[in-house]
Amino acid sequence: MTQETTLPDEVPAELVELARVHGVRTEYEGFDGTTKHVSGPTLVAVLEALDVPASTPQQVSLSLARERDEEWRHVVPPSVVVREGDEVTVPVHVTDGSDVTVWIEIDGAEPGAPARARRERRDLTQVDVFVEPRTVDGRLVGRATFALPTDLPLGWHSLHAATDGTEARGALVVTPARLDPPQLREGQLWGLLVQLYSVRSRTSWGMGDLADLADIAWLAAHQGGADFVAVNPLHAAEPVTPVTPSPYLPTSRRFLNPAYVRVEDIPETAYLSAADRSLVEWAADPVRDLDTDPGPIDRDAVWDAKKAALEVVFTAPRRAARQAAYEAFVAEQGRGLRDFATWCAIVENLAGRPWPADLDGPDAPGVAALREELAERVEFWTWLQWVCDEQKHIAQRTAREAGMRIGIMHDLAVGVHPAGADAWANAAYLARGVSVGAPPDMYNQQGQDWSQPPWNPRALARAGYAPYRDMLRTVLRHTGALRVDHILGLFRLWWIPRGSGPAHGAYVTYDHDALVGILCLEAQRAGAILIGEDLGTFEPWVREYLADRGVLGTSVLWFEQTDGAPTPPEDYRHLTMATVGTHDMPPTAGYLAGEHVDLRERLGLLDEPVPVVRRKARAERDMFVQALAERGLVGEDPSEREIVEAMHRYLRRTPAALVGVQLVDAVGERRSQNQPGTDTEYPNWKVPLGDANGNPILLEDLFGLQRLRSLLAVMDDPR
């Protein structure tokens, strides 16, 4: 949002106060340790994105005056999120002098249970707290204070108040004080980190799929003793080509990408006629040839072929039990699934034409008629999500039956595509005119703009956090653990006004007690471990808070330094998942060789002279190799492979609860999967799994590789 403002460059005190009460920070600490101040125009743009008028001094004054009374306009708060066992009071606002009755309806239903599930009423007791009445919108309003019982069960309840013949209602969510997964009581666990699309097999269709995931998990458990396989986000992409390659810029975080479906594993494929079976085979033939292509991965070709085959399978009859299972899934997912499938059908129907105003949202005037007109396509996209869910379930079941104590670790992206399904369906809860990103840091000195619309924190609270809950419930289905990308975004997010560069943004804070608490509640219900990607610039208390809630952090060996030296293994945190690198860095072999410097030089991403950057990279490498040598993990002049294995031995000596091994490190791959700060300049998220020379490695050959077997032996050795 780039609008002119009558505010001077020097930020007025009232604008600073308005920003403060709406959780917009007016300053922050840069990566260089200096305090940065947010400009007046940026504050105005961010406040406007929060639906707070602030473009003139008069609007600032009026908005500030309105905000001071906002809490008093609600009989009960729209949402109250508490930890189990905490002593909490709730303010209730009524016309001064009026009687009020307040109670809780306890929801005895588990997620997906029918509406007839038992609900228990608990009346609340008023506590003696005097607060001076206040005139709000011409009415004298009084405040009564009620205490919540400390023995409320975990779950989603509702808070009610009856006064003057009317009843008000708000959401009441009771969250776990702390997650304590039993798997983490069994000592350090380790697993593979896999970019699933990159791991192809002789039976996949040009990119890795959910059947490949099940096989990877089974093999990793039986041949390496792994306890989990972590994968990139499997969120939904565009329903038509071209599709966005990045798994971190999905159209929906709630639903899955059907490009990961193994067509032949759908039971109805067995009932196709010979002619229809031939259609499926013909669709597969061209993309199966891509499995040995050194890359880049052609997602568009894969999806066009797979979609054509899936349309054939969709027409096959379903047995009574299968049909009943499908209908139960549709009923459980409810309106969210219907809206997602409708959006997919509309995108198909528009075929690239501009989006009409009367279709701008699921409740827009033209949507109901078009949904009926496209009923068969809506049904197709609904069915696809059921198929995805089934195959995701099979992968997790296979992993657990193979002996993994965790199974599949899924990944939750930080946001969604601004023109995607979630942005369409959840527009009322997202901020417009801004995008999410990161301020400049040591590795991205221009800052980053991820182009994703953020949650509007107040709109989300007014909705009782239902959109957030519904998304988490679907993501956590059939999941042993969930990695939350940029979990710091549950505390604060860097909002960048449209038209501004990433450096010209501001941090907007969120109710982290609510967001983290709800995340913990849904994870506990799903039996899943939580891992937060807590890298970057943040206040130290954030990590302590997450640990207090039982959420693991992230430790990356290259980043773990104390006083300019590698952090000793014994000083690592316990509640963390430790890895050597990340998917935003070259694999360890490439990093040791300084290929990240070569790549950034070719792409024009360096802010310092090339010799200086090379010298720093070499010094970093030598420093870590020296630390390995001091602990007897490498000898003199170690080979690349010896260093890679020694780094993983180093991590096995830490108290970290989880240790992750990037699959690319196990095969000697050197190419980056993603280069931050680029789009089309580099084939981000398109690099197929290969060896040190870039030769493709298929899943069937993977666990026979001596290099991989040697590293797995390191990981399976408890010493």
Image: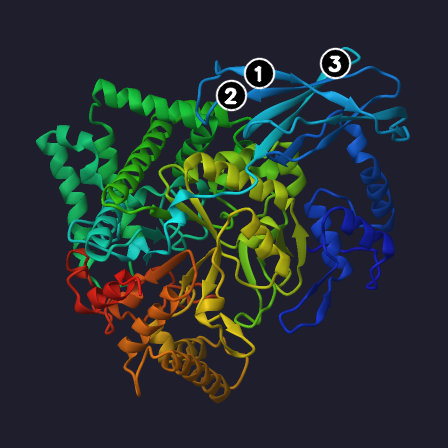
Disc 2 and disc 1 in contact, CB within 8 angstroms? yes
Front-lying residue, 259 or 152: 152
Disc 1 and disc 3 in contact, CB within 8 angstroms? no
Name the residue type under label 2.
Answer: Gly
Q: Which mark is residue 120?
A: 1
Instruction: Work out whether mark 2 precedes mark 3 in sequence or the reverse, and give the earlier one.
Output: 2
The quarter in which the C terminus is drawn is bottom left
Front-lying residue, 66 or 80: 80
Q: CA distance from mark 2 to mark 3?
A: 25 Å
Write down the residue under mark 2: 108
Q: How is the image coloured?
A: rainbow
Q: CA distance from mark 1 to mark 3?
A: 21 Å
Name the residue type under label 1.
Answer: Glu
Above or below, 239 against 289 in this view is above
Q: CA distance from mark 2 to mark 1?
A: 7 Å
Above or below, 351 against 486 in this view is above
Name the residue type under label 3.
Answer: Thr
Above or below, 432 against 649 in this view is above
Residue at image point 72% right, 58% down: 42
Q: Which mark is residue 166?
A: 3
Left or right of residue 344: residue 553:
right
Q: Secondary structure at mark 1?
A: strand
